[in-house]
Image (spheres, rainbow, N blue to C red):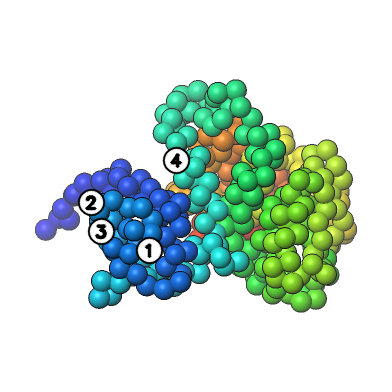
């Protein structure tokens, strides 16, 4: 018999925002941080988080069904993953990206159709605001954003720390380092390295605070500056994570060229983000991230590994290769 065609995939995708918003609300409520202190029943959790009796049980059981909570004998608890990555008290917390998705992106994606038709950002720019200007002038929002970047980069950071041949090098700097998630993971895994992070001056106290949590202040320093306006710090290896996709093609090549000029002969540039597969068929997250750049930026877009390698060669890099890291993320490495 021929395989029956059903609408199941269509319905799952079309209503996927139900599960997404359920997780985002749980993060907003601090549910996983609460449960990191120990299991609790539905009545206790409803009381602590101000949940209505009509909603509490369905909300908690939906999180069980989605694989975000466990339940045994009426007691709810975190899964190993949510306990490690969604407890705000742990340095491994990656919920910052989810907090930002909940506070900003969830609403902005509601006007994606308009963005597709106009090619214009759908964020604060629509109402005369300046997202980055407002972001960097508000310490609370800036901290949320920087920890969001730490969260989205954590899987890649751990993989880069293990997969790249660091034994060949002594120094590195992460360009656009945010709170310092990538430098910290590299330094933890590679004890012989010294390095740091380069970002706007306002980021420095947040970076230094995060690095201090891991007792790495003696090996990782902060370099203040603007990567378009100022020289990049010199090091054997430069890293750019979730940076290139913010910018148009000319700006992308400018940053790649600056990195090439800064590196010593034999030095390496690591680009990492949700690199789209060359056939543009498989990495849905990378393609959706490129749509997110439409929402958020005037000219940013994501790209394939082949695209990035060609741009690197164009500015002078001789050896280039693409290697998968974790989940949807890969790194493109160029050698001077």
Residue 265 visible (yes or no)? yes
Q: Nearer the viewer, mark 1 or mark 3?
A: 3
State the SS at label 2.
helix
Please give the residue where the numbered disc 2 appears in the rendered image: 54
Tell me if label 3 and label 4 are in contact, CB under 8 Å: no
Could you tell me which residue is drawn at 34 percent across and 70 percent down? 40
Image position, residue 232 (x, y; %): 84, 49
Closer-to-camera residue (177/275): 177
Ranked by sequence position, the earlier of labels 2 and 4 is 2
Whole-number angstrom distance, CA of label 2 to CA of label 1? 21 Å
Whole-number angstrom distance, CA of label 1 to CA of label 4? 20 Å
Q: Is residue 275 above or below residue 79?
A: above
Please give the residue where the numbered disc 4 appears in the rendered image: 106
Q: Nearer the viewer, mark 2 or mark 1?
A: 2
Whole-number angstrom distance, CA of label 2 to CA of label 4? 25 Å
Q: Residues within 10 Å of mark 1 (few under 14, many from 20)?
A: many
Could you tell me which residue is drawn at 80 percent across and 42 percent down? 226
Q: Is residue 142 above or below residue 336?
A: above
Image position, residue 264 (x, y; %): 88, 58
Ranked by sequence position, the earlier of labels 1 and 4 is 1
Closer-to-camera residue (170/282): 170
Please give the residue where the numbered disc 3 appears in the rendered image: 57
Residue 325 visible (yes or no)? no
Image position, residue 304 (x, y; %): 58, 48
């Amino acid at each position: 018999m021929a395989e029956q065609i059903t609408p199941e995939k269509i319905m799952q995708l079309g209503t996927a925002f139900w599960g997404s918003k359920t997780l985002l609300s749980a993060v907003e409520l601090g549910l996983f941080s609460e449960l990191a202190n120990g299991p609790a029943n539905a009545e206790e959790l409803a009381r602590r988080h101000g949940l209505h009796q009509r909603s509490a049980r369905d909300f908690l059981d939906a999180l069980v069904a989605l694989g975000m909570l466990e339940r045994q004998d009426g007691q709810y608890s975190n899964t190993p993953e949510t306990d490690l990555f969604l407890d705000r008290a742990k340095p491994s917390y990656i919920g910052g990206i989810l907090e930002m998705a909940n506070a900003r992106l969830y609403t902005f994606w509601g006007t994606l159709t308009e963005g597709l038709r106009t090619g214009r950002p759908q964020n604060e720019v629509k109402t005369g605001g300046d997202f980055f200007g407002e972001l960097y002038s508000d310490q609370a929002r800036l901290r949320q954003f920087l920890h969001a970047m730490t969260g989205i980069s954590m899987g890649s950071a751990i993989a880069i720390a293990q997969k790249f041949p660091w034994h060949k090098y002594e120094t590195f700097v992460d360009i656009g380092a945010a709170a310092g998630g990538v430098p910290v993971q590299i330094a933890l895994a590679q004890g012989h390295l010294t390095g740091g992070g380069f970002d706007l001056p306002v980021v420095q106290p947040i970076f230094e605070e995060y690095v201090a949590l891991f007792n790495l202040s003696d090996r990782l320093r902060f370099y203040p500056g603007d990567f378009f306006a100022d020289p990049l710090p010199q090091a054997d290896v430069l890293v750019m994570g979730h940076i290139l996709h913010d910018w148009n093609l000319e700006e992308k090549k400018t940053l790649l060229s600056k990195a090439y000029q800064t590196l010593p002969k034999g030095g390496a540039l690591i680009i990492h983000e949700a690199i789209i597969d060359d056939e543009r068929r498989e990495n849905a997250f990378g393609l959706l991230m490129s749509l997110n750049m439409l929402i958020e930026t005037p000219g940013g877009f994501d790209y394939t590994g082949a695209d990035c390698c060609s741009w690197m060669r164009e500015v002078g890099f001789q050896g280039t290769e693409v290697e998968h890291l974790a989940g949807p993320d890969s790194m493109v490495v160029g050698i001077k």
